[in-house]
Image (cartoon, rainbow, N blue to C red):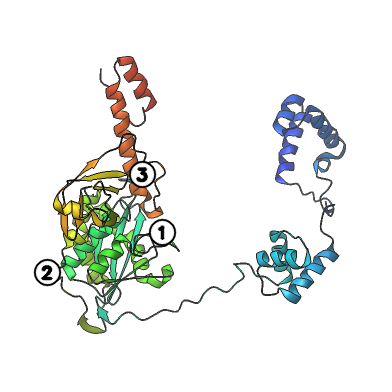
Amino acid sequence: MTGDLLTLSTREMDTLAIITRLAERRMTQAEAARCLGRSERQARRLLRAFERDGPAGLQDKRRGRPAPNRIPKAYREYVLGLVRERYRDFGPTFASEKLQEYHDIRVATETLRKWMIADGIWKTRAQRKKRIQQPRHRRDCYGELVQIDGCEHHWFEDRSPKCVLLVYVDDATGKLMALRMCESESSFSYFHATRSYLERHGKPVALYSDKAGVFRVNAKRPKAGDGFTQFGRAMSDLNIDVICANTPAAKGRVERAHQTLQDRLVKELRLRGISTMDDANRYLPEFAQDYNRRFGRVPRNDHDAHRPLLERDHLDDIFTWQEQRRVTAQLTVQHKRTMYLLEPTEAAKAAAKKRVTVVEYEDGGVSIRFQGVALAARPFHKDGCVTQGSIVENKLLSGALTEIRKRQQQREQELVRSAKSKREKRIVHDRFADRLPPPGP
């Protein structure tokens, strides 16, 4: 307290309000103790201090005094002297490890960090200079580099749930090359968008993306695989390179396009009363054409770097999920918790104990191929197959949750149908009342 100025903490202000009501007999001691989280004896002690000294009696008497367990100043200076002498370029964590290892000095990492920051030895993230990101020139040719990215946004505002817009932007001209609405940034979503791009424009030299798991294997030491994601494998088959940017600013062309789309496209969809992804996908080519007319630029070089699709570029086969699996001696193949039994043909017997390619289509259909020949197979479903604990990437979470909700609703509806009596149906419906339609009579 300085002069007539009294400083109270938020907790002390709350205590003052309660004790004031207690002093004015608008609250009992038991109620005051319950509100304060203390005993009635402590409530009476606070009341006496308030009646004696007023609000100042509720102020913490330890304020302004040094903590009894604080580290001595001489010890702090000794530690900082060692750090300045030997570990000036060490981070706080590494420095604390070396102080303990070589000098038997045990100082908490965060304590040492605060000391080093106060002494000017270490800088916080806010104090460090930001990385300089100088602009680069656009590529010379149309189709030489195409930036791709997905943007999750309320594209339909409150008319429909959030969804993802896949955006392809040519680096040389800034034109929108392809747009597609989808539930999440999955491999099949990018397969659809890329296929429409290729059929319209041809094959670009390279695609420029972020480091999402759709484009890049992010595991440092993957246990299996050839180092390609499904999208990367498809682009490799088409002789299109995929380059990953290290920062969002590196692919600023598509990032800035997101901002324009979140403004203009949202309003265009509202004006046209479009509220579904299917309707939006039918309108997007028209929007892209108008966007390119307004914002597209002329490339510095007139050469079109797009290459035509070749006869061997079978897009129906390339844009599938493909994995290598080993055939057992009993002519069985495991894929996604499902066992497939191969028909004992001569081709299947030749594939025993060898690797085959399991091709999965978007509709869930599976084809097993050995040396380019499809093998006859049928799925063998095990009872009680567990699918809990599946790993879902962040960008695929929206689509995964949508599928989970559909599956849960189907299970709950099956429970309603399997209920024998009206009473059982009513109990099941009440349990899932917020997710199911009302039961029949």
Name the element at disc 3: helix
Q: Residues within 10 Å of mark 3 (few under 14, many from 20)?
A: few
Indicate which disc residue 26 carries: none
Callout count: 3
Q: Which residue is mark 2?
A: 311
- Cα distance, mark 1 to mark 2? 35 Å
Image vertical order of residue 315 relative to residue 384, above or below: below
Circles 3 and 1, Cβ within 8 Å, touching? The answer is no
Q: Earlier in the sequence, mark 3 or mark 1?
A: 1
Query: Which numbered disc, 3 or 1, marks the residue closer to the eye?
Result: 1
Question: On the rendered image, what quadrant is the C terminus found in?
Answer: top left
Name the residue nearer the viewer: 76 or 310: 310
Q: Is residue 75 left or right of residue 151?
A: right
Q: Is residue 122 left or right of residue 429?
A: right
Q: Which residue is mark 3?
A: 401
Which residue is drawn at the image coordinates 63% and 67% (left, top)? 124
Q: Which residue is mark 1?
A: 223
Q: Earlier in the sequence, mark 1 or mark 2?
A: 1
Q: Is residue 385 visible?
A: yes
Which residue is drawn at the image coordinates 77% and 72% (left, top)? 82
Q: Which kind of residue does numbered mark 2 sit on?
A: Glu
In which image quadrant can residue 108 be found? bottom right
Name the residue nearer the viewer: 244 or 14: 244
Residue 155 is situated, as x and y percent measured from the top left of the image, at 32, 53
